[in-house]
Image (cartoon, grey):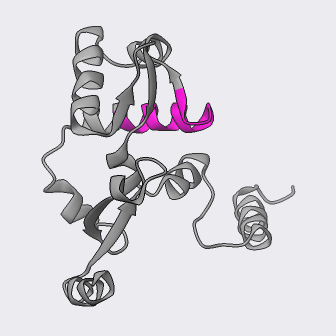
Amino acid sequence: MLKVLEEEVGKLGLTIKRVSEGGEPESDRYFLTLKGHPTLTEARTFGWRIDDMAMLTVTLAHLLAKGGKAPFREVESILEEKFPKFRVEPTLEKFIRMGYLSEDEQGTLYVGWRTRAEIDQQTLLTLLLGKEVGKSPEKQEATRSDETSQSSPPPS
């Protein structure tokens, strides 16, 4: 059934993504997402504030660097270094309500189900680390050495 649906939605530029919520197959969620990444023009129509996108990016980068979880207060203090304090806590709470983050009773933040469904976490980290997606390490090194040789001044 899913394969037939996958073929049909594929014609529309969509794909079905499964997100596991636990060990039980009954708890899995299925989502329709875009195939590939949206263009800059498409991303502009999502209706997000740029500072909210930045806060989510910083939060996810921190959580992923910490193995997928971190204390709420730790994330909050990191965000308060760059964003207005009065916006940080409500924005984190909004991300929890939207499913991008989840929080347990001890106040630990985790990557939420919606992040796992909508965001390619590996690509996010790759982009944040400055590596080019789709290039082998040898090609990245060659590109880096080409850029260095082109930007260095000629010997006098």
Answer yes or no: is residue 114 visible.
yes
Instruction: Write the residue at 60% across / 73% down.
Output: 134
Q: Is 68 within the magenta?
A: yes
Instruction: Write the residue at 76% across / 56% down.
Output: 152
Range covered by the magenta-colored residues: 56-69
145 versus 27 height, above or below: below
Foreground of the two, 94 or 54:
94
Horizontal placement of 83 versus 67: left or right? left
Residue 2, given in percent of the width and then of the height, sits at: 30, 81
Residue 117, given in percent of the width and then of the height, sits at: 36, 56
Quadrant containing the N terminus in the rendered view: bottom left
Locate residue 14: give its quadrant: bottom left
Foreground of the two, 57 or 119:
119
Answer yes or no: is residue 118 visible.
no
Q: Is 18 within the magenta?
A: no
Instruction: Write the residue at 52% across / 58% down.
Output: 123
Horizontal placement of 100 versus 141: left or right? left
Residue 27, given in percent of the width and then of the height, sits at: 35, 52
Foreground of the two, 113 or 93:
113
111 versus 36 height, above or below: above
Quadrant containing the C terminus in the rendered view: bottom right
